[in-house]
Image (tube, rainbow, N blue to C red):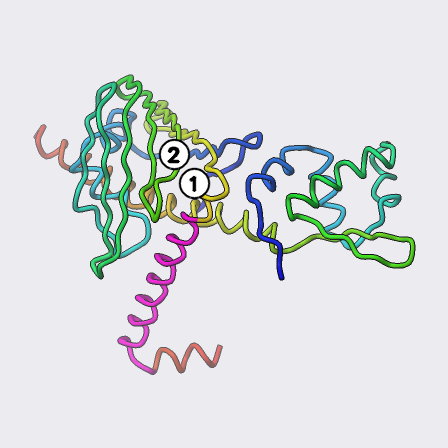
Amino acid sequence: METPIDLDAAFSALADRTRRAILARLAEGEATVMELAEPFEMTQPAISQHLKVLEEAGLIVRRVEGTRRPRRLAKPGIEAMDQWLTMLRKALAANYDRLDGLLKEMKAESTRKRS
Amino acid sequence: MSKMSLRTEADRFVVVTRRFAAPPRAVYRAHTEPELIQKWALGPDGWTMPVCICEARPGGRIRYEWVDGKGGGFHLTGEFIELVPFSRIVHVERMHLHDVTPDNHIETRFEADGSGTLLTMRMTLPDAATRAAMLATGMEHGMEASYVRLEKQIAAGAGGLAAEKCV
């Protein structure tokens, strides 16, 4: 069974620069906590805390491999947020394109009235 | 055309900007006069807004009703908080889908930009349940639009479909 996506938690998780950087790194492929900590000059517990937030938001998942716990992107989480923003973008873009046409009509109308 | 920008700000806001080739006065009017709003604030193709109440004064009521002409529809209610003619509107609105969504606080600014207008709309990000409900409703609309397009293609003749397959 798939975990339901908590979009609020997902957006909160993305509000942090380090967490966005972690996601960008994971977009390139799976990585362990140690590998993730390296470029950030942060302690492993600090990185683990960020990973926990991302995990709870449904953005990343972990795999067990012996003593290693590599993390990777959890696609559904990212997609659910994208989907919502995409839908909003589409509806607004359609509205504003129509508004362009209406504004043109309004202008023509006022020009007619003046002449 | 990529005239519109939409971005999230912190974890609570969505900021949308868009330029229009008309002065702030005209763009503002299109946001506050019912007979103008009904011509453009319609969402996906095929939807209309038969009811549009927009009392553009502080405390004034807002009520937009949309229908798809096939028995589907939903509405939005709200109130105006502040209006500065031709430059700023602050209002709250809520969608009435299966349930009523929490209030969304929206600030819309209209700034002169050359001979045109730069519109900036800053809205509160709805909570997860609201987004899910809006998404579900939007999906229905989106699918509807796809079916309409498909119907048009089919009406245009099988030749068009065959040609597409060859691509």
Residue B34 in the image, given as x and y percentages of width and height: 18, 35
Query: Which sits earlier in the primary sequence, circle 1 or circle 2?
Result: 1
Residue, disc 2? B19
Q: Chain of mark 2?
A: B
The residue drawn where x is 38% and y is 28% is: B106
The residue drawn where x is 43% and y is 45% is: A88
Residue A90 in the image, given as x and y percentages of width and height: 41, 49
Mark 1–mark 2 distance (CA, rounded to whole Å): 6 Å
Q: Callout 2, which amino acid?
A: Arg
Q: Looking at the image, which is closer to me, B44 or B4?
A: B44
Q: Residue furthest right?
A: A67
Q: Main secondary structure of the magenta part?
A: helix
> Is B145 covered by the magenta stretch?
yes
Residues in magenta? B133-158
Residue, disc 1? B3
Judged left or right of residue B102, residue A45 is right
> Is B89 covered by the magenta stretch?
no
